[in-house]
Amino acid sequence: MSEEHFTNNIYSFSDKEITNTSKVNYLDIKKTASIIRAINHKLRQSIVKLLEESETLTVTEIYVKLRIEQSVASQHLAILRRANFLKTDRKGKKIYYSLNHEYLDHVNKFISDLLEVQD
């Protein structure tokens, strides 16, 4: 096989790859990264674990159990809520936080699929 033939095959392969691949959607990547960043924090993971054990908790119950400031708990709950990991239910003046299990299952499947592709 000549060097010219080999080079032509590489170029035709590259052209095929370019035309058959999807464009990268940077907005989706940015959104996905922010979702993963939301859960990739020890304190937020602790909040999720607490909610797995207790099902619903108020911000007061969360900050008392984790021995943190109320404002810190509220900030982290807001991040988890914006990332759609939490649901809220207002009863009078209290807001009860619970896990959005359907969404967490979706994120877990996405991460499993992503890791599977890497292997």
Image: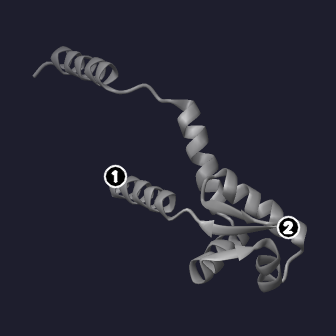
Q: Earlier in the sequence, mark 1 or mark 2?
A: 2
In the depicted structure, whether residue 107 falls above or below residue 19: below
Check the picture and name the quadrant holding the C terminus. Answer: bottom left
Between 43 and 56, the residue placed more toward the observer is 56
Callout 2: few (<14), some (14-19), or many (20+) C-alpha neighbours within 10 Å? few
Residue under pointer 1 = 117
Position of residue 67 in the picture relative to residue 87 (left or right) = right
Tell which residue pokes out farthest to the front in this image: 92
Task: Report if residue 46 is visible in the image.
Answer: no
Q: Amino acid at mark 1?
A: Val
Callout 1: few (<14), some (14-19), or many (20+) C-alpha neighbours within 10 Å? few
SS state under label 1: helix
How far is disc 1 from disc 2 in space, using C-alphas?
Answer: 37 Å
In the depicted structure, whether residue 107 falls above or below residue 11: below
Residue under pointer 2 = 72
Of circles 1 and 2, the one toward us is 2
In the depicted structure, whether residue 82 falls above or below residue 108: above
Q: Amino acid at mark 2?
A: Val
Position of residue 60 in the picture relative to residue 14 (left or right) = right
Between 38 and 15, the residue placed more toward the observer is 38
Q: Which quarter of the figure has residue 45?
A: bottom right
Q: Which quarter of the figure has residue 62?
A: bottom right
Q: Are marks 1 and 2 in contact (CB under 8 Å)?
A: no
